[in-house]
Image (cartoon, coloured by chain):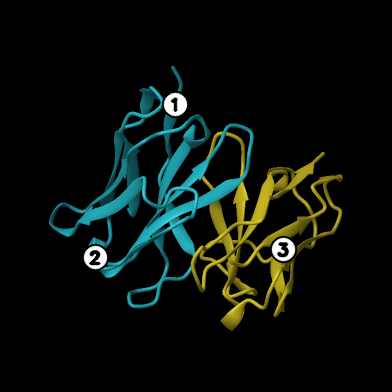
């Protein structure tokens, strides 16, 4: 079964850091681009970041550029999101998701994790 | 940056009705790289349609997508109770791979 399990969320003070993880199973992890998407409470979906073959091929939403870093460990089938200089507006449920197509293509997001909640508050 | 605008924001409908949701892009979506997702409360989104009109695996044929360029739509031919949810469109050809703001279908 193809599965993504996100973890690492919690309550953090503004300006601090947090690292999210996503464990993948059931597919050849290093064949697919991976994403983080977030959803603030009661709001819509916001694309956050994408990583392709390795951590050298990444892109980000403007709202997180320079503060968040997406990376992957292909040997351990894991995706990460390092979040620095956190702000109140980063409070959201963070989903990891898999691209549908084999790389170099990416495509839509066909498998999603259950999400991990990040709350930024003093 | 491509901005996606969905309409309407909320629709109140009954089971058995037909509904069409709209997603308009601020510039042309190349290759029809446009997807639709369904999200129910407390759940992760689920991919319904990709390439503007192709159904994802396991999606019932009452769901159909159409459109090209800047105008796209999702049609549900006959609503069932489990279809009442929020629907999002997303373009995925170039970054930022943004989502529309969503359309909520309610009974």
Q: Chain of mark 2?
A: A
What residue did someone put label 1 on? A120
User: In this image, A110 relative to B103: left or right?
Assistant: left
Q: Tell me, by letter, which chain the rendering colours cyan.
A: A
Gap between marks 1 and 3, in whole Å?
41 Å
- Tell me what residue is drawn at x 86 percent, y 54 percent: B17
Total number of numbered discs in the rendering: 3
Residue furthest to the left in view is A75
- Tell me what residue is drawn at x 29 percent, y 67 percent: A57
- Tell me what residue is drawn at x 51 percent, y 73 percent: B93
Tell me the tag on residue A56. 2
- Tell me what residue is drawn at x 25 percent, y 68 percent: A53
Disc 3 secondary structure class: loop
Q: Chain of mark 3?
A: B
User: In this image, A67 relative to A48: left or right?
Assistant: left
Please tell me in which quadrant of the rendered image residue B6 appears.
bottom right
Q: Tell me, by letter, which chain the rendering colours yellow.
A: B
> Visible in this render: residue A90?
yes
What residue did someone put label 3 on? B62
Residue furthest to the top in view is A122
Please tell me in which quadrant of the rendered image residue A29 appears.
bottom left
Gap between marks 2 and 3, in whole Å?
41 Å
């Amino acid at each position: 079964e193809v599965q993504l399990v996100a973890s690492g969320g919690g309550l953090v003070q503004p300006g601090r850091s947090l690292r999210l993880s996503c464990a993948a199973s059931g597919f050849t992890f290093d064949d697919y681009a991976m994403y983080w998407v977030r959803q603030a409470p009661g709001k819509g979906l916001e694309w956050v970041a994408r990583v392709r073959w390795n951590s050298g091929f990444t892109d980000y939403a403007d709202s997180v550029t320079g503060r968040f870093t997406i990376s992957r460990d292909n040997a351990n089938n894991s995706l990460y999101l390092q979040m620095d200089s956190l702000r109140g507006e980063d409070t959201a449920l963070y989903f990891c998701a898999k691209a549908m197509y084999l790389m170099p293509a990416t495509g839509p997001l066909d498998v999603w994790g259950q999400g991990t909640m990040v709350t930024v508050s003093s | 940056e491509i901005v996606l605008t969905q309409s309407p924001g909320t629709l109140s409908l009954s089971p058995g009705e037909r509904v069409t949701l709209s997603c308009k892009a601020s510039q042309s979506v190349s290759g029809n790289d446009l997807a639709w997702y369904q999200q129910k409360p407390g759940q992760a989104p689920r991919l319904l349609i990709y390439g503007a009109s192709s159904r994802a695996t396991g999606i019932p044929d009452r769901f159909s997508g159409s459109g090209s360029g800047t105008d796209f739509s999702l049609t549900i031919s006959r609503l069932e109770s489990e279809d009442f949810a929020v629907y999002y469109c997303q373009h995925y050809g170039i970054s930022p791979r943004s989502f529309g703001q969503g359309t909520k279908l309610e009974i």
